[in-house]
Amino acid sequence: MRISPGAEATPVAAKTARVDQLPVSEPSWFDQSVRPESQAPRPQPPRHEPLRQERVQQAAPPRQEPLRQERVEQAPPPRQEEPVRETLPVSGYDEEPEDRLTGSDEPKKGRKPLVVVLGLLVVAALAGATLYAVDEFGGPAAVEIKPPAPPAAVQPLVKAVTAGGPAPSPAGVKSVLAGPAGNSALGTLTGSVVDPANGTVLWQQGDTTAATPASSLKILTAAAALLSLEKTDQLSTKVVQGAEPGTVVIVGGGDPTISGTPGSSVYPGAAALDDLVNQVKQKGQVTKVQFDLSRYTGEALGPQWETADIAGGSVAPIVPFMLDGGRLNPKNDVSARTGSPAQSAADAFAQRIGAPGATPGTAVQGAQVLGEIKSAPIEQLVDNMMQISDNVLTEAIAREVAIKTGNEPSFAGGVKAVRDVLTKNGFDLTGANFVDGSGLSATNKIPAKLLTDVLATAAKPTLDDPRTAKLRPLLTALPVAGGSGTLAGRYGGSASGGKGWVRAKTGTLTGVNALAGVVVDVDGRVLVFSFMSASNRNPELEVRPALDVMAAALRGCGCS
């Protein structure tokens, strides 16, 4: 993702079902009116009071009276400044909600009645315990303790989508897309729409013609990672004993998400540098820090990448050890990056452990491990890279695919690994030529059909295809229209019908915009789409809204 006017990157929203996604006929519980606590109807105690009194009379023997009196005397004096209701619903060890009410017109009352009632209940509980003890030693029958009631049945408001809805027809889809696809703001438009339930191509326009995908290329890198890596795999960063006394070596493990400032990260579940520092401190004094970057080879910047993108916040040099993706402001996903992320991260470690600035070095094979931290699992890293369109994290994951498949951990090796994995899994890469894993290079070219093929495989309604189970997380990693990630601020105006129903990966470069994902139509059918536009029109005000309208039109499609 390269930031141009109206760039796509936005903060991540939590991936929970949106109220917008719920059918209008089935209101969410969020919509139910809730009366303020101070206006809530007071419980009617009279029907409970006889029962409470009965339990006291049955359970409290005369010999326990001093104990009850003692507890009353030890109770704190009533606070007259707080209003207390005349009767309180007492059950077990509940808190005291009445004390938190405000704005009541009732006169203030003391707490003595409440204390007495509580004391009686305590006595009753002690009596119950006594009966139980007697029964254990052959006395009267113990009080029967019944098991808790089963949990209440839950009826979810969000319904599962199945392949049972009416199947749309190519003619119907072509009809609803005719107007949106003809918008001149889209310039040269290529794309396709597919029904993943049966593989039917419902709409296509130049879908086999290679075009610049921008960040929608991340779909291919994510798919290759999910197909080749274990979802639970983690990236490990270690500190090992150096060759000299007091020397330690940080061994970069390919995790760009390490958090340098606790609580300030755009990467959920990120490991913390402070944790690594504390582990090493426990092993002894450190006088010298080195860092080993040998996990990666080749250039740190991709082909045709621009150094201006570092200051622009799109990317940092790709090295196997850094903090917060190289961001200067770890809380901002589009923050300017540092041009020397490894040196900056190693210096931060050295400063916190009390050593002079760090220098490059090489770890001795088999050296003692003094500390280790691990990233979030691969599945979560893939989710995060898709949500905020993180170029650095994507390139790191491409290198992990390269290492897993025996390729060189470089830009070229990562690209080869992604191609190899997709080809091995039956995807046709004819016409696809790309030089990085993130889509930042303008020289990348792929056909829209390749994107829809991958997404359609992930969206099949059954899991009889082994690829589908592995690719399923790709769908939940897609940003939600008007709700999360790079789509959080989109889908207003004419595209509002798609809000909450469209999930898609965006793509933005100068003169290039793309949108590829899934949508549920009004008949409950899942459709997969990919749209790629080459246009010199205003991206924020014209091109992206036009792509959003196309996807929203599919949402409104009853196209059978």
Image (cartoon, rainbow, N blue to C red):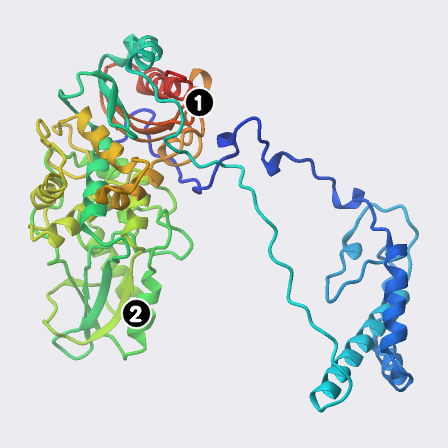
Picture quadrant where residue 361 is located:
bottom left
> Residue at position x 85%, y 77% from top?
59
- Figure quadrant of residue 62: bottom right
Kindly report the distance in space between the C-alpha atoms of the residues bearing marks 2 and 1.
59 Å
Query: How far across and down, in percent of the image, does residue 82 sit?
Result: 84, 57
Quadrant where the N terminus sits is top left
Q: Which residue is mark 1?
A: 522
Q: Nearer the viewer, residue 280 or 217?
A: 217
Residue 191, placed above or below residue 180 = below
Q: Nearer the viewer, residue 501 or 15?
A: 501
Which amino acid, mark 2?
Ile
* Frontmost residue, 256 versus 470: 470
* Whether residue 111 can be seen here: no
Q: Residue at x 11, y 41 (%)?
A: 415
Residue at (91% x, 59% y) in the render? 109
Spot occupied by residue 537 in the image (x, y as percentages of width and height): 28, 13
Mark earlier in primary sequence (2, 1):
2
* Left or right of residue 357: residue 473: right
For disc 2, the marked residue is 353
How crowded is the residue under tag 2: few (<14 C-alpha within 10 Å), some, or many (20+)?
many
Q: Which mark is residue 112?
A: none
- Can residue 452 be seen from the camera position used here? yes
Q: Tell me which amino acid carries mark 1.
A: Val
Q: Is residue 440 left or right of residue 500?
A: left
Q: Nearer the viewer, residue 25 or 495?
A: 25
